[in-house]
């Protein structure tokens, strides 16, 4: 398509050009192609070729991926964080029944978690540090969840009601609201 405009073809055959050469090319296009449609097509092609030229001008920098070695990763290890925590360490030496009550889960669930991690214990057996270590992250998260639930229960939402006392409604409608059906009102007024 660029072959239809030899002025553009000559400009983009150059290895490099400056803004002055580009402005001269635009002036030549405006003089050579005064028709609106050809002029518009030439300018669109010029913009497209400029974009393509700028993309191919520095191909190595675009395709180069940054080295992963340059990025500093934060030294965060979940196991170190859990080992430093004291919440789950309070359960060391306790039986599974007590641990299940503290975590508000069934004891069979804790036994199944332990068996998935390769630790086989009975319900009446006290758990040591090495036996609790594989599920320490779960225990820590569960204790945090229960603490948040306790905090949320402290704050009760109070809803404001717009219930007005019955004496506010006067007349027949107030009496109906107070006594119920219209039959009761008729009986009361006939006395």
Image (cartoon, rainbow, N blue to C red):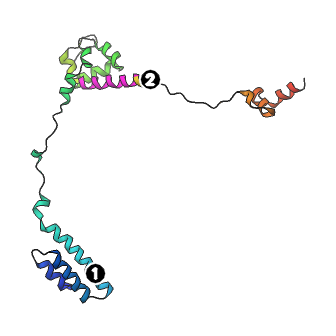
Q: Quadrant of the C terminus?
A: top right
Given contact means CB atoms under 8 Å apart, are the residues at marks 2 and 1 in contact?
A: no
Specify the quadrant of the image occupied by residue 97: top left
Name of the residue lying farthest toward the right = 191
Tell me, yes or no, if residue 1 can be seen here.
no
Q: Quadrant of the N terminus?
A: bottom left
Q: What's the residue at 65%, 30% (across, down)?
A: 163
Specify the quadrant of the image occupied by residue 7: bottom left
Q: Is residue 121 above or below residue 57?
A: above
Q: What's the residue at 30%, 81% (across, down)?
A: 40
List the residue tagged with mark 2.
153
Q: What's the residue at 22%, 77% (across, down)?
A: 46
**In the rendering, at what x and y percent does residue 112 appear?**
27, 23
Number of labels in the image equals: 2
Q: Main secondary structure of the magenta part?
A: helix
Within the magenta stretch, is there residue 44? no
Q: Which residues are magenta?
A: 135-150
User: Disc 2 or 1, which lies upstream in sequence?
Assistant: 1
Q: Is residue 58 left or right of residue 117?
A: left
- Mark seen at residue 41: 1
């Amino acid at each position: 398509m660029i072959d239809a405009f030899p002025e553009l073809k000559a400009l983009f055959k150059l290895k490099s050009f400056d803004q002055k050469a580009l402005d001269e090319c635009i002036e030549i296009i405006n003089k050579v192609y005064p028709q609106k449609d050809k002029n518009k097509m030439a300018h669109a092609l010029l913009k497209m070729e400029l974009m393509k030229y700028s993309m191919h001008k520095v191909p190595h920098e675009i395709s180069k991926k940054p080295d992963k070695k340059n990025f500093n990763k934060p030294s965060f290890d979940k196991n170190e964080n859990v080992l430093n925590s004291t919440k789950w360490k309070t359960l060391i030496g306790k039986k599974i029944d007590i641990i299940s009550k503290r975590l508000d889960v069934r004891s069979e669930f804790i036994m199944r978690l332990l068996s998935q991690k390769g630790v086989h214990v009975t319900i009446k057996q006290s758990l040591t540090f090495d036996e609790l270590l594989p599920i320490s992250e779960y225990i820590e998260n569960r204790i945090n969840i229960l603490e948040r639930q306790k905090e949320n229960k402290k704050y009760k939402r109070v809803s404001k009601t717009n219930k007005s006392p019955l004496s506010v409604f006067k007349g027949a409608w107030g009496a109906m609201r107070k006594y119920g059906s219209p039959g009761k009102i008729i009986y009361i007024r006939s006395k």
